[in-house]
Image (cartoon, helix red, strand yellow):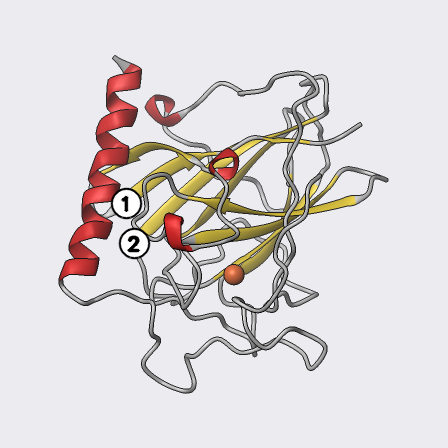
Amino acid sequence: MRRNRLLVATALFSAALALTACTGISAEAPTSAASTPSPASSSSSPSPAASTETSRTTAAAPVVPAPEDRVAPTCVPGVTLIEQNQGPYYTQGAPERTDITDTAPGTALLLTGYVLDDQCNPVAGATLDFWQADGNGSYDNNGYVLRGVQTTDENGTYALTTVIPGQYPGRTEHVHVKVTAPNGPTYTTQLYFPESNANGGDRFYVPELDVTITSYDGSKMTAHFDMVLPA
Ligand code: FE
């Protein structure tokens, strides 16, 4: 039953993306100079397509998902997070918060999950620094819209209230994150959405970093992704 629900939610999301592409409302081409993604600093690569966003190696009280949206941890001992390059749009100093939406346009997204060690034990006190484009594929490179840092609770859980990111040239929908265990190194990665029509055209996309869509009704999505840290 639950698997059927997930398949339906994923299919709905895929259909919505296909409809967006057909109606030309795609966010692949931001319409104003102000909203066009640009490097956060002069040391950043000028283009996501030109950057090297890949390599191998993933505060306030979290929002608690409704019981039907809770997902048990998914973890295989020793199978750890795939790291990817941070890309050109990271900004240090994001505020501590679990809701990073502000006034950003886009469809509501609640992303939840666990941070686990390589033996699948919860990692409490891990920090997660999220950043992403808005629903139109634009980053806020002057402020902190759609940027925020949060800390896992005693169960290793996190919950991010945000919007479904839009596509931008060369990139499918994705959420960036840096995750750091207490006194541990920082792992950087990007999370993707299964069956997006742009996944195949994004050279950084890997299915292992797909979130699991647990519900989607066209106006709100809930999704899940666990981050298993290397030893
Ligand atoms: Fe990006």
Amino acid type, callout 1: Lys
Residue, x 70% and y 19% (percent of image)? 121
Quadrant of the snapshot with the N terminus: top left
Residue 84 x/y as whole percent: 63, 49
Horizontal side of 35 relative to 186 (left or right) equals left
Q: Secondary structure at mark 2?
A: loop
Residue, x 20% and y 58% (percent of image)? 20
Sequence-wise, the earlier of marks 1 and 2 is 2
Amino acid type, callout 2: Thr
Residue beneath label 2, please? 107
Residue 44 x/y as whole percent: 67, 74
Residue beneath label 1, please? 220
* The one of 208 and 41 positioned closer to us in this rendering: 208
**Pointer 1 with pointer 2, Cβ within 8 A:** yes
Q: CA distance from mark 1 to mark 2?
A: 6 Å
Residue, x 50% and y 52% (percent of image)? 175
Identify the image quadrant of residue 101.
bottom left
* The one of 33 and 98 positioned closer to us in this rendering: 33
